[in-house]
Amino acid sequence: MRAVVLVGGFGTRLRPLTLSAPKQMLPVNGVTMLERVVTNLARGGVTEAVLALGYLPEVFQAEFPSGEIAGVKMHYAVEPEPLDTGGAIGFAARFAGFTDDTFIALNGDVINDLDIAGLVAQHKAFGGEGTIHLTPVEDPSRFGVVPIDAEGRVEAFIEKPPADEAPSNWINAGTYVLEPSVLDRMPEGEKVSIERAVFPDMVADGQLYAVQRDGYWVDAGTPESYLKVALDLVNGVRSNEPAVAADTTVAPSATIIGSIVGSGAVIDAGAHVEGSMIQRGAHIGANARVVTSIVGPNALVGPGASLEALTVVGDSVTVESNSVHVGAKLPDVPKE
Ligand code: GDD
Ligand code: MG
């Protein structure tokens, strides 16, 4: 089986971390988001994949120069301009020659344990042009909402409906099985949204099906969900990976509670780190406090500084000693 992985977005909601690295290249407990996604594809029988690249494509190629991730042969398709989700799938599938057989397409920022092979089997049984994986969420307003009938046929695809107007709590979980005929709905070089144009057209033609699966699922595209997806790997919610890299320097009087500390990081005396992610090479000064926050690679949090409530510190940024930040982005970035 072959797959198109969408990784070309700007990662706006994760700025400033995504000013220097695309979202899917951010670490999720020491392993890039992309590698975690491709590992699950491999488990589901995918042997070849193409990255639909737009923003900072060279960062991907530099990190995976062998052209292979988790045993999956990778192609790199770089869009001349952002083609939106549908245009990007069409561009990348044609680039890699995935035009003659059923293929997977997926959002590269979704972390889950979906049984891909099972989804493909369901798709074959439905016999439509496309099958979408659905997951239940409390607030569907920031997702694609997908009501289905008793046979699994999609009744409507409503991307980001206003709060309280969603007809269902089952949303598009971002993994699709598609027939090559869907490429005809994505004309070459044209900007088109799969969620706002291609899927609604397929619904109108009765060609779109969906499968509801209630397993572990997180879209890691916001500071809150990105932090959660990483911490869930070390706090037993999803697994119990080691939370602190082997080569860190942690002062005996520092306290680290329910947090991830990346390779080469330094935590000085009296510092308090709780429910947070300290990325590789970052330095937390004496008596600083980092709670429910993310400190980017090689950043320096000055002595006595306090970060809380999803404060995000960018790559190599220095946070002033004794300064206080609540829900801040450092440096500040314009709102979405
Ligand atoms: N190549 C390329 N070009 N990739 C893109 C582009 C583009 O122009 N625009 C977005 N992407 C990529 C992003 O990098 C991401 O991997 C994926 O497409 C989805 O974009 P997001 O920006 O993360 O979308 P979202 O999270 O708001 O919504 C999407 O995901 C939800 C599930 O997580 C939609 O598919 C929703 O319907 C869905 O519920
Ligand atoms: Mg997303």
Image (tube, rainbow, N blue to C red):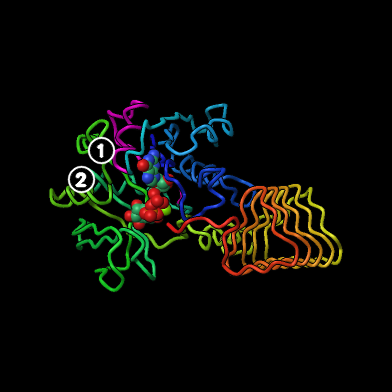
Q: Is residue 334 magenta?
A: no
67 left or right of 284 in image: left
User: Residue at position x 62%, y 59% from top?
Assistant: 294
- In the rendered structure, the answer to whether residue 156 lies left or right of residue 56 reads left
Residue 289 placement: quadrant: bottom right
Whether residue 107 is visible, yes or no, is no
Q: Quadrant of residue 45?
A: top left
Can residue 63 be seen here? The reply is yes
Q: 10 Å neighbourhood of mark 2: few (<14), some, or many (≥20)?
A: some
Please give the count of numbered marks on the rendered protein. Answer: 2
Provide residue 66's location: percent of width, then percent of height.
57, 26
Say which amino acid is labelled 2.
Answer: Gly
Q: Position of residue 280 (x, y in %)?
A: 69, 48
Q: Nearer the viewer, residue 68 or 95?
A: 95
Residue named by callout 1: 179
Tell me the magenta residue range. Answer: 85-109
- Which residue is under mark 2? 128
Q: Work out which residue is located at the far left of the displayed protein and give it.
A: 205
Tell me if 9 is positioned left or right of 200 in this view.
right
